[in-house]
Amino acid sequence: TRGVFCAAFVSNPADATISTMKKAKSDVGPIETAKSMIESDGIPSLFRGLGVRMFFYTFIVGLQFLVYDAIRFSLGIGSDDLKLYLDVLGGALRETGGPV
């Protein structure tokens, strides 16, 4: 959960800047837009919508794990099966000079 909050916190200023650029419909770049946001509304303007973003990220990641586990359980794949698959894959990649 901390990782989700950190990702939301780090990416929110860029998203807020892009949203402001789209609303303005001008040719001003992202750096100039961010500067004008800070000048007019202060640094908190870069973090507008952060709470919603944190909730949304947490919801999406939780939903992904729910779908993953549902598929895994419906196919009867246990954690030992996954470990065996990853061990075989790692060995094959080492032999072929893959990215491992």
Image: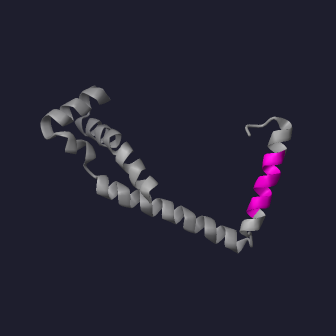
Q: Residue at x 15, y 33 (%)?
A: 39
- Foreground pick, 60 / 27: 60
13 horizontally vs 82: left or right: left
Q: How many marks?
A: 0
Looking at this view, name the residue that lies furthest to the right: 95
Residue 27: image location, x then y, percent:
28, 26
- Foreground pick, 56 / 94: 94
In the image, residue 33 sits, relative to residue 69, either above or below, namely above
Residue 87: image location, x then y, percent:
79, 53
Q: Quadrant of residue 38?
A: top left
Q: Quadrant of residue 82?
A: bottom right
Q: Residue at x 25, y 27 (%)?
A: 32
- Foreground pick, 99 / 35: 99
Residue 100: image location, x then y, percent:
74, 40
Snapshot colouring: one colour
Residue 59: image location, x then y, percent:
44, 63
Quadrant containing the N terminus in the rendered view:
bottom left
73 horizontally vs 45: left or right: right
22 part of magenta stretch: no
Task: Please give the range of residues in magenta.
Answer: 82-91
39 horizontally vs 8: left or right: left
Q: Residue at x 66, y 68 (%)?
A: 71
Q: Main secondary structure of the magenta part?
A: helix
